[in-house]
Amino acid sequence: MLEHSLFRKLPPWVQAELLTQKGEALALRHFNGWSITLHPYENTFVEVWAKFGVEVVGTFHQAVSYMDVIEPYLAVMPVPEGT
């Protein structure tokens, strides 16, 4: 993958393509017809929103806590038993 500042300079469709091809998906959820995939990238999270062949890439501000990012995905993320 590319360094974060270079990644952000790419067009959004290239960002989405790179994340799909080379990124690791943590979770997938659905909201109002959108499929939203959460990817970790360089100590931050990136979401790819997809609907009707359109993909929108979003990153989170560094001030956002990890729990705020992951909370919408908790219902679909597997949690190991006994923890």
Image (cartoon, rainbow, N blue to C red):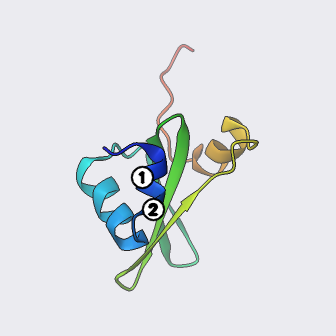
The relative height of residue 46 versus residue 56 in the rendered view (above or below) is above
What crowding class fits label 2: few (fewer than 14 Cα within 10 Å), some (14-19), or many (20 or more)? Answer: few
Judge whether residue 37 can be spotted in this image.
Answer: no
Q: How far apart are marks 2 and 1 (CA)?
A: 5 Å
At mark 1, the secondary structure is helix
Horizontal relation, residue 79 to residue 2: left or right: right
Residue identifier under label 1:
6
* Quadrant the N terminus occupies: top left
Residue identifier under label 2:
9
Q: Position of residue 40 (x, y in %)?
A: 46, 41
* Quadrant the C terminus occupies: top right
Residue occupying the far left of the picture: 21
- Residue at 50% across / 41% down in the picture? 77
Q: What residue type is labelled 1?
A: Leu
- Residue at 45% across / 62% down in the picture? 9
User: Which disc is residue 22 wearing?
Assistant: none
Judge whether residue 49 can be spotted in this image.
Answer: yes
Out of 57 and 77, give the one closest to the viewer. 57
- The reply to whether callout 2 and callout 1 are in contact (CB within 8 Å) is yes
Task: Count the labels in the image.
Answer: 2
Q: Position of residue 43 (x, y in %)?
A: 53, 34
- Residue at 40% across / 71% down in the picture? 11
Q: Position of residue 16 (x, y in %)?
A: 37, 64
What crowding class fits label 1: few (fewer than 14 Cα within 10 Å), some (14-19), or many (20 or more)? Answer: few
